[in-house]
Amino acid sequence: MPRTTRASNSLQQRAEKLFPGGVNSPVRAFRAVGGEPRVIIRARGSKLWDADGNEYIDYVGSWGPMILGHADPEVTEAVIRAAQNGTSFGASTPAEADLAELVKAAFASIEMMRFVSSGTEATMSAIRLARAFTQRKYIVKFEGCYHGHADSLLVKAGSGVATLGIPGSAGVLDEQAQFTLALPFNSTEAVDQAFDRYKNQIAAVVVEPIVGNMGCVPPREGYLQKLRDVTRSQGSLLIFDEVMTGFRVAFGGAQELYGITPDLTTLGKIIGGGLPVGAYGGRVEIMRMIAPLGPVYQAGTLCGNPLAMAAGIATVSRLQRDRAKIYPALERNSSTLVNGVSQAARESGIDIASARVGSMFTWFFRNGSIFNYEDACKSDTARFAHFHRGMLDQGIYLPPSQFEAAFLSAAHTSADIDQTMDAARNTFKLMTSKPLSVSR
């Protein structure tokens, strides 16, 4: 049964007078799934609570970084201790080097790094650096991959752009977009054609090694190696955008999982325990081009801020210390959940294709495998909206978009998974008997 949402609705109406669409990030508006968004006031472990006191099992996890669950005691205590000494100095602190050493130990490809304030900033900066290092203009990205909202990266982007049906973004100049080559993901032929046509002109290939922003889409066998080989042969840089996958699919990210060494790596808020932070890093010879050592400028008052550093040290230290226990449990629980929900859909006669790598996953409402953005776009988004609504009414909080990956945390229990699978069975039965309304 639908839950009482009077307080959330009132707060949303208030917000709509202050923010475009009542939100500060577009997907939060629930436009793709219908209904009013829930206004969240508290979270702990695997659970969220909204303004009406409704409890939800959370599979968004702040879009991935809450791998230990919400309000993890070690992380929370670390932030409190740091805040008692001051929240921002605009100066260097020992914690920056402490976290950098932990990140470097996990990612062999990162010899030197720079902390920034978001994944968007990290990837934007890495591309600027790649262009400076190679002295080339063109970059290759892939359709449906979202690398943040920097102008040149919003060409055929996924995430909220795909959710809202926007073919890019107004305000991005043709003069900027012309140097971004958007190719279909998982197509080696398209990569060969691009490098043949723009021979010795491509500065970098930037890729989500496991896509999370058109839903979870893994690379085909040998695809990432192809990107490594062609960039190396033509003097281009390979940038792995591991904002979602870093520390998520393995302690050393997708590059550890697949055995590929990129030239540059970008990381996001998982390295800050969910606080606003990002990083980009790679070989020393490349990173030494960053100011003050080199001519590539990038700066930020909150880069390496003490709160994010403290949360990051606590999170990454815990992952490092307990990785032999955490990652196998994430794999086991995620497999049980994804397979269980998929089986329930099939038993109800509902077309569904699941995709999963480790603890990131998506249920696509369509038949067949998903290899690229075109495949993902053939999903039945209206049916996904029905599913989302039914699950929400039963206390399961999923990403409000067919084109966003979901995430499981170390805090999720077998009871959470059983409850989620029961909710899915109930929702599928309801979907096949009486379609749910998705009008706002």
Image (spheres, rainbow, N blue to C red):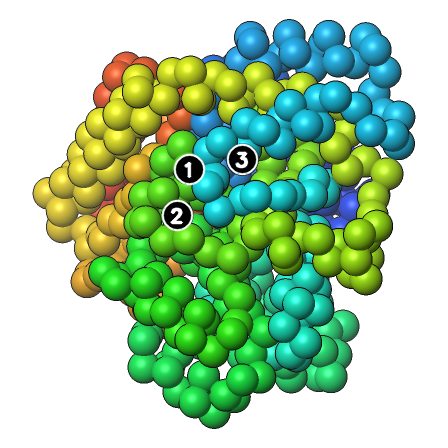
Q: Depth check: 5 or 180 in front?
A: 180
| CB under 8 Å between discs 2 and 1 | yes
Q: CA distance from mark 2 to mark 1?
A: 7 Å
Asked if 323 appears above or below 221 in the picture, the reply is above
Q: Earlier in the sequence, mark 3 or mark 2?
A: 3
- Mark 2 lies on a secondary structure that is helix
x, y percent for residue 322: 38, 16
Number of marks in picture: 3
Residue 290 location, quadrant: bottom right
Residue at 68% of width from left, 62% of height from top?
A: 129
At label 1, the amino acid type is: Gly
SS state under label 3: helix
Circle nearer the N terminus (1, 3): 3
- The answer to whether residue 145 is left or right of residue 84 is left
Instruction: Give percent across and percent down for residue 411.
Output: 40, 17
Using the image as rendered, state which of residue 170 and residue 426 is in the foreground: 170
Residue 377 visible here? no
The amino acid type, in three-letter code, at marker 3 is Lys
From this view, report whether residue 233 is shown above or below residue 255: below
Q: Residues within 10 Å of mark 2 (few under 14, many from 20)?
A: many
What numbered label is drawn on residue 104?
Answer: 3
Residue 91 shows in this picture: yes
Point 64% across, 7% down: residue: 77
Circle 2 is placed at which residue position? 255
User: Of the numbered discs in the image, which one, if any, rests on residue 252?
Assistant: 1
Residue farthest to the bottom, as pictured: 197
